[in-house]
Image (spheres, rainbow, N blue to C red):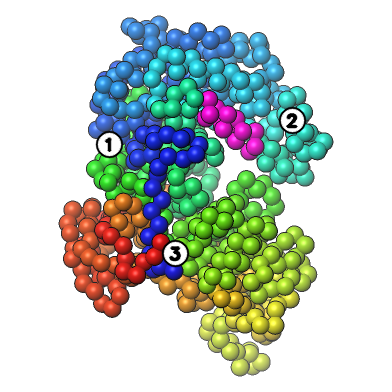
Amino acid sequence: MSSVSSRNPAKTASPETGTEGWWRHPFSVFQSNLQEVDATMDVERALDIIEAQGADTWLINTAGIVSFYPTELPFQTRSPFLVDRASGDMIGDAIAAAHRRNVRVICRCDFSKVSSRIAAEHPDWLYLSPKGERQVYNTLYSCCPAGDYYQERSIEVVDEILARYPADGFFFNWFIFPEFDYSRVYHGPCHCAKCQASFAEFSGGKSLPSGPDDETYAEWRRFGHKVIRDLCIRIGAHIRKKRPEAALVLNREGADVIYHEANNAFGRDLWPHITSESVGAHATAFPEVPVMVNSVTFVDMPYRMAGEQPESFAQYLLQAIARGGNPSTYIMGAPGRIPYASLPVAGEIQRFFRDHHDVYEGLGPASTVALVRPNLVRSAVMGHMASASEFQGLFSGLKECGLPFDVLSKDHIARIGSEGGLGRFSLIILPDVGEIGRDAAEALDAFVRAGGHVVLTGGSAITAEGESELATGPAVMQSGAPLEGDALWSSYVTDVDQPDAGDYRLAARVVPVYGSYADYVWKPRAERIGRYIPQAPYGPPEKCYGHMPGDRPAAMRLVSGGSVTQFPWTVGHTYREFGTTEVRDFLQDTIAGFAKPEIISDLPEQVEIIAGRSAAGLVIHVVNQTGVKTRAFGPHVTLGPSRIRIRGGRGPAQLLRAGESVAGHNEGDELVIDLPKLELFEVIVLAGEPEGATS
């Protein structure tokens, strides 16, 4: 297995499109989310601003809630301000002006709501709550995605637009079931007649849930996912037949371009790596399908006129392009009408991306370590939040240790394994993801037998009945229910002998255990790593003693060609909650022999290093995240000069941000590069293959 993967997932034609579309190459988007009053906007001035930002694609409201062209469809509502426009057709003017400048236009449609007139004429299209109530917001009625407005009339809208304009793509907003409204009021799953009948057929006669606490809610989530995905595939096929030059942009499999929205929200804890996580997971699973990261310039929906912190916005775009995504800036209103403080830094990054399309052409993941992401569709299942915390804790820990890694979706392990894609990894980490299924287990077993290494934490690869799914794993089965909550408080693990524990003296290192710890029946050949120190009194101080290490392990390992290391506790969740580096380092030291970093630097842990490969060669993004705060990012701290080592690398290196070439020098099998001071980011490009790399 190579030190840095040479796999180059070029974005070429796919079976879904059968064509070489414009979206197969790097592109940069500017979305103006229009208000009704913008029907009279100056499209030439808007395009001046869009081009100055470095964008080559304009995403603009076209149809749905309000039509910005003179629609003739009786179930559409024209903007009342179109009458004040000389042409009476804002979309026609915008597309004509954009195409004169070689700027593409993606038409934004929103079928989530209709006017009261249309609602009265078509009540069967509407959402119905479990209490039998409609969802009405600012005079608009919410529609059900299972109803005919989404399922049939949406295609008629697409046909009318294509009959009038040479659109370059379509984006459908709010392609979800409307459980919440804009005020975050919970209304529940839709109970319209269509949903009742369709869900009964899907579930084998079960009744619709009223909310997340109902036992059928998780199944309803899967039902909703299927309804939306099937519609996406059908609309995509229709658009490709009508206009192969147009892309379908949606956050669902089956789209030509996968849409990810990077945003903030009050009341929500900051997960500073959400964009890196989401884009990375997609790029690993579907390298042939581009992803667009639509980054929101305002702080939250109720505060659309208040700008996002520029440093937070910069992270959205930087993490997007570093993982192989295409950047997009999303504003409210006509360009230039509402001031947003993040637009200057957005323009800086998007122009950088525009000027280096050769580097970003076909950019895909290239690390040899994979961190598995939990199944998002099953986010309603009990225990998902703990699994997400485990994932985030491990993500943070690996990043802080300077270990580049790719994100691998749990859902796609089996498929990627069957295609031979797991072979580029040397280490795959599963963070408390629960049951993985027979096909994924067989793929991982084959990976281990071929010399790969797997790390399991928490209940990864354990069935609901407690059986171990991996034949190559150290466990036979789980024994009893895991210790959780306060039953686990004041328990620890240690990786050193504790000869004086009987005298109430403990030697370093003693690491806290939080979340869950489970007992297993271990295979005879499995090797024990460290020991578990069970709970003892933790208060009052006078009674706080008696911690005695037992025979239960901190981790177990079985070697079968490669190896499987199993942590029977949630080490990532512990680190996410406690933040003590002893927890992080315990994991890192345990897996150090299997996670040899191909890129090493002396930069601080607040820097994220992301390895990729494109037609230009090895591409390393170095992203300065020293400005991270509780709810957002603030100004970064200038770092360096610094030094970075690339195992198997060959100079010279191009520093794109600094605009210089660095020869570097070799020490053993490492290329050593001295970097100048690091501001917000740097991009290092090494042409050619690392020495000794294999495909």
- Circles 3, 2 touching at the beta carbon (< 8 Å): no
Q: Which residue in the structure is indicated by mark 3?
A: 368
Task: Indicate whether residue 237 is drawn in magenta.
Answer: yes
Mark 1 to mark 2: distance in Å? 46 Å
Front label number (1 vs 2):
2
Q: Amino acid at mark 2?
A: Ser
Residue 663 position, x and y percent, is 18, 66
Q: Which residue is mark 2?
A: 198
Local crowd at mark 3 within 10 Å, few (<14), some, or many (≥20)? many
Q: Residue at x 74, y 44 (%)?
A: 213
Magenta residues span 225-238
Q: Which residue is mark 1?
A: 54
Q: Position of residue 631 (x, y in %)?
A: 46, 49
Distance from Cα at disc 3 to Cα at disc 2? 44 Å
Mark 1 against mark 3, which lies toward the viewer? 3
132 sits to left or right of 554: right
